[in-house]
Image: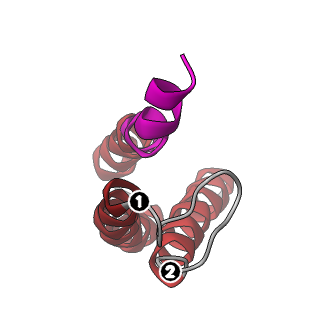
Amino acid sequence: MLLSIFVTLFALIALFEGVYFLTHLSKPFLIFDPAKSPFVHRQLQIWGVVMTILGIITLISAWTNSIAFIVTMVVLGCILETQMAFSVTSEFRAKNR
């Protein structure tokens, strides 16, 4: 039961992140301005869709009681979250070396 709650929380965070990226494609936020940078705009589109799909599938996995499915989604989520963080911030890191 506790595992399902924590995986649901993880799924909701990924889902929120994906929706947030998709709704901020033309608004500046944090250090990013997708309206001025086509690279950031494209990254937000890609990762918004990926995170939304990941959140939905992880939410489904949380309530299947299949440990293999849950573990697979959590590991995949961790890898994708790390890749997303590096790819979205890569332009900022390259400019500020």
Residue at image point 39% right, 68% down: 48
**Residue 74, quarter of the rendered image:** top left
Numbered disc total: 2
Relative side of 77 to 9, left or right: left
Q: Sequence order check: which comes first, mark 1 or mark 2?
A: 2
Q: Could you say where residue 49 lies in the image, as x and y percent from the top left?
A: 32, 71
* Highlighted magenta segment, given as a residue range: 81-97
Residue at image point 34% right, 57% down: 43
The residue that mark 1 highlights is 37
* Label 2 Cα neighbours within 10 Å, binned few <14 / some 14-19 / many ≥20: few
Q: Could you say where residue 37 lies in the image, as x and y percent from the top left?
A: 41, 59
State yes or no: residue 73 in magenta: no
Can residue 82 be seen? Answer: no
Quarter occupied by the C terminus: top right
Q: Which residue is at the front of the view, 74 or 64?
A: 74
Above/below status of 28 relative to 67: below
- SS at circle 2: loop
* Main secondary-structure element of the magenta-colored stretch: helix
Q: How far apart are the alpha carbons under marks 1 and 2?
A: 10 Å
The residue that mark 2 highlights is 26
State yes or no: residue 90 in magenta: yes
Q: Which residue is at the front of the view, 68 or 37?
A: 37
Can residue 60 be seen? Answer: yes
Q: Indicate the amino acid at tag 2.
A: Ser
Q: Could you say where residue 12 lies in the image, as x and y percent from the top left?
A: 59, 69
Quarter occupied by the N terminus: bottom right
Residue at image point 52% right, 83% down: 23
